[in-house]
Image (cartoon, rainbow, N blue to C red):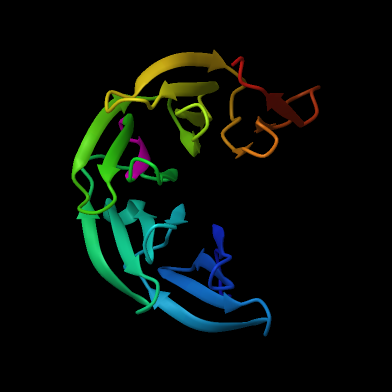
Amino acid sequence: MGNDADNIRVDTAANRVFVGYGSGALAVIDPAARRKIADIPLRAHPESFQLARSSGRVFVNLPQMREVTVVDRAAGKQIAAWPMNSGGNFPMALDEETQGLLVVFRTPPGLGVFSMSQGAEVASVEVCGDADDIFVDAKRHRVYVSCGEGFLDVFDAQSDAYRRVAHMPTASGARTSLFVPELDRLFLAVPATLGQPAEIWVFRAAR
């Protein structure tokens, strides 16, 4: 794989695995053959990236370049680069129902929503600091953002306003999370502190 492997995504329809790594690449892996079959070059190290089900596109956060790169999966190459006005674009999620690309920025802290087709900004709202993960709850039309600042933010995504409906205190450094729709739970990794072991906190939506 090379160094600094980061995010991983599985394309179940094509039976391919994508891994972001190094100074700028997406590796394409054939899991049946257990080998890398291609590299898709990028202009910088990729952070979060997402595979769009509704198209053959991959959306990739390149925080060093302050941009979102758009990749054609079939062609195996970049087809667009959308500049971002803010920096630290690490977390990313897709809302397939509304065709929204959700990107969270760290400098300054904010949530940007963009059109998956053209990259035009649809909404921009304040969010907790040092964000690392974002998830879309399609069942409730909500968005969850976990931040190392020590908060979990919840947004109502039923309109383009993306109104924040909860700003829940968690723990300092607790930025890594996973929302599992099948279990209807959000799991938050809370790091160890002096006298306190590491924990996994489990959240369930009130309704």
> Residue 22, position in %: x, y?
48, 68
> Residue 110, position in %: x, y?
33, 30
Q: Residue at x 25, y 39 (%)?
A: 86
Q: Which of the 4 image quarters holds residue 88?
A: top left
Where 14 sits versus 193, above or below? below
> What range of the chain is rendered magenta?
100-108
Q: Residue at x 46, y 70 (%)?
A: 26
Q: Is residue 109 magenta?
A: no
> Residue 150, position in %: x, y?
55, 22
Q: Residue at x 59, y 30 (%)?
A: 173
Q: Nearer the viewer, residue 21 or 50?
A: 50
146 left or right of 204?
left
Residue 6 in view in this figure: no
Q: Which of the 4 image quarters holds residue 201?
A: top right
Main SS of the magenta part reads strand
36 left or right of 101?
right
